[in-house]
Amino acid sequence: MRKLLLILTLATSSLLAQSFNFIKEFGNFKESSALSVTQGYNIYVSDTDKNEIYKFDNSGRQISSIGGYGWDIEAFDEPIDIFATPLNIYVTDKNNNRIQIFDRELNFLSLFKTHENEAQEFSFSYPTCAAISTNGDLLILDSDNSRILKYDLNGNYLQQIGNYDAGSYKLNDPVKFSISRDGRIFVLDGNEIFVFDQFGTGISKIRISEDVNNISIYDFNLTLTSDKKIFTIDLRNVANGFVEFNPAEITDNEIITDSAFINDKLFILTSKRILEYSVKK
């Protein structure tokens, strides 16, 4: 199979094709880790220090929150990732070894976890990412076994992705994954992004020469974050390369932890707040 190879430090030819204009900042976090944004610009954020989840509206106003440390429902032990659909919110409750599911107003609906007596093939522990695929399946990054597990929405196991029998596409130290509009799964693993098709078959790799800590995809806008920079690329036209953005608003005492490039807006989550930008092409 053809390997796609892109080097971030060389892919700056389209820098002038986009401009990012600062709009506002909002939120006050202690140690945020992830955000997820819906098409209507409802914004959900997880704070791993406070073990809390927040919802903001499109004006930046906080309208609800849940959480606190614990193992009961609506409590968390390191809610490291969050994924929002128009109806439901999926919170990766890492140290409780489960995914908690809420409605869009953060009312508890259900939780999903596997059990110690289940076969290792079907079970996960210390999950670090979860998302719903374009086919409606639940994908979970099982950090304890460096693989992604796929389940249907009834909790039935479907398959493993990137496990030991994936050959050159075996995952080594996956951090997070995200899913494009056409169903491809992009997994950040060390200095590479492993790309799988919707059936879990490895199809390409992207080598990255910067230290990045997160990946997100909204439609076809793939965004990588490093501590102080953003790198974004249009997956429909990868030949243009990555656009690099170094936000002047990032202070010395905060780092970028996540981002969302959706429609004509870029939301940057730092460890302390959210920065919102308009994007012009």
Image (cartoon, helix red, strand yellow):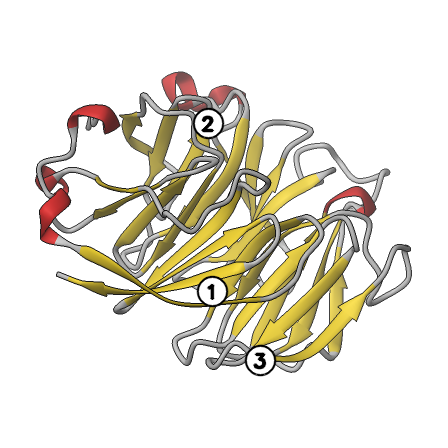
Badge 1 crowding class, 10 Å Cα cut-off, few under 14, some 14 to 19, many 20 or more, is few
What is the quadrant of residue 135 in the picture? bottom left
Q: How many marks?
A: 3
Q: Is residue 3 shown to the viewer in this render? A: no
Q: Quote the CA–CA distance across marks 3 and 1.
A: 30 Å
What label sits on residue 189 in the rendered view?
2
Q: What residue sits right under mark 1 in the picture?
A: 136
Residue 95 percent location from the top left of the image: 80, 42
Q: Quote the CA–CA distance across marks 3 and 2.
A: 35 Å
Q: Residue furthest top?
A: 168
Which residue is found at the position 27% from the left and 54% from the top? 221
Mark 2 in CB contact with mark 1 (< 8 angstroms): no
Residue 114 percent location from the top left of the image: 77, 47
Q: Viewer-nearest of labels 2 and 1?
A: 2
Instruction: Please say if 148 is above or below 209.
Output: below
Which residue is found at the position 78% from the left and 55% from the top? 51
Q: Viewer-nearest of labels 3 and 1?
A: 3
Badge 3 crowding class, 10 Å Cα cut-off, few under 14, some 14 to 19, many 20 or more, is few
Quarter holding the N terminus is top left
108 and 28: which one is in front? 28
Task: Decide if residue 130 is on the left or right side of residue 204.
Answer: right
Task: Decide if residue 99 is on the left or right side of residue 174.
Answer: right
Task: Decide if residue 26 is on the left or right side of residue 101.
Answer: left
Q: Mark 3 belongs to which amino acid?
A: Arg
Q: Mark 2 belongs to which amino acid?
A: Asp
Q: Viewer-nearest of labels 3 and 2?
A: 3
Q: What residue sits right under mark 3 in the picture?
A: 61
**Is tag 2's residue or tag 1's residue first in the polypeptide sequence?**
1
Instruction: Please say if 188 is above or below 190.
Output: below
